[in-house]
Amino acid sequence: MALSLHKVASRKKARVAIGLDTSQESAEKVINSALFAKREGYIEPVLVSGNDVGPEIDKAKVVGTEMPLVVEQNPETVFIRMIRDGAVDAGVRGNMSSKKVIPLLRSEFLVDNLCRVSVLEVANRLVLLAPVGIEEGETMNELVAISENCEELASKLEMPLNVAVLSGGRLDDYGRSPKVDKLLSESKALTSSLAALGFKVTNYGIEIERALADGVTMLIAPDGIFGNLIFRSMVLIGGIESYGAVATALPRVYIDTSRAKGSFLLPMILAGALSRQ
């Protein structure tokens, strides 16, 4: 489904809430991405903000006319409740602050862990990367749970699941340091646990390049800090395309985004494609 997400989104034309912080430099990018997504027929965007949008960032004067704008004193709360209550089919964080949105998501949906999974496009195929929230994947149980969530996400995306467990060294690097030994032992245990659950899984150690060359479709990092560093290296430096990160622990479709990205279009398309329309 890697190259047909656009088609699926176009068919559904989901109503998608998009977070907009007008005080950020990226505000204009959010508006332009939403406008393009609407005019191309991918989604019906609903912008949610704490302020009206001025002409300095809405140069085409489309906000409030071609695209609806919801202005609220507590925009993050309203944005999340629109998703939770089904007022929209899906939500994309846009350029709202993750420091505000993520805790509210946990409290409104009564979950401890969002289990965020990045959806990347590598060599014309979708590749899932998890965990990517810096506070996620801190225990073996969390890594197993997020892997199981990835299995469900892969099914929705109609993609095969071939898992690479990553670690802090090559598999023959035992003895280099206590920290490396601990990471290698944990990756070995995780690989065994996933194999016992029926996953097609291989322990690649630190060799992420070999895993991708072998055609894997899912990368499991040792924890969310490692995963976030991998994401930033691949996407923000290496130029790999990212569709955003799906909060797989939620019963509704929510796509997390990076405010450092030059465009927010692909997360909007993914939100539309995953919606229940």
Image (spheres, rainbow, N blue to C red):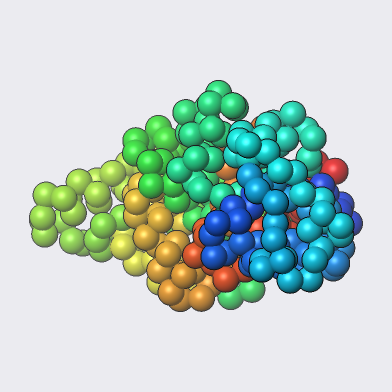
115 shown above or below 123: above
Q: For the point 34% across and 51% down, which residue is it?
A: 225
User: Taking 243 as reference, is 31 left or right?
Assistant: right
Q: For the point 84% across and 68% down, which residue is it?
A: 40
150 shown above or below 87: below
The quadrant in which the C terminus is found is top right
Residue 49 visible in the displayed image? yes
* Image coordinates for residue 110, horizontal then vertical, percent: 55, 23
* Image coordinates for residue 65, horizontal then vertical, percent: 86, 57
Q: For the point 68% across and 38% down, which residue is it?
A: 72
- Nearest the eye: 26 or 250: 26
* Image coordinates for residue 185, horizontal then vertical, percent: 24, 46
- Nearest the eye: 123 or 82: 82
Residue 192 visible in the displayed image? no
* Image coordinates for residue 67, horizontal then vertical, percent: 82, 56
Residue 253, quarter of the rendered image: top right
The quadrant in which the N terminus is found is bottom right
144 shown above or below 201: above
Residue 87, quarter of the rendered image: top right
Q: For the point 21% across and 62% down, which residue is it?
A: 172
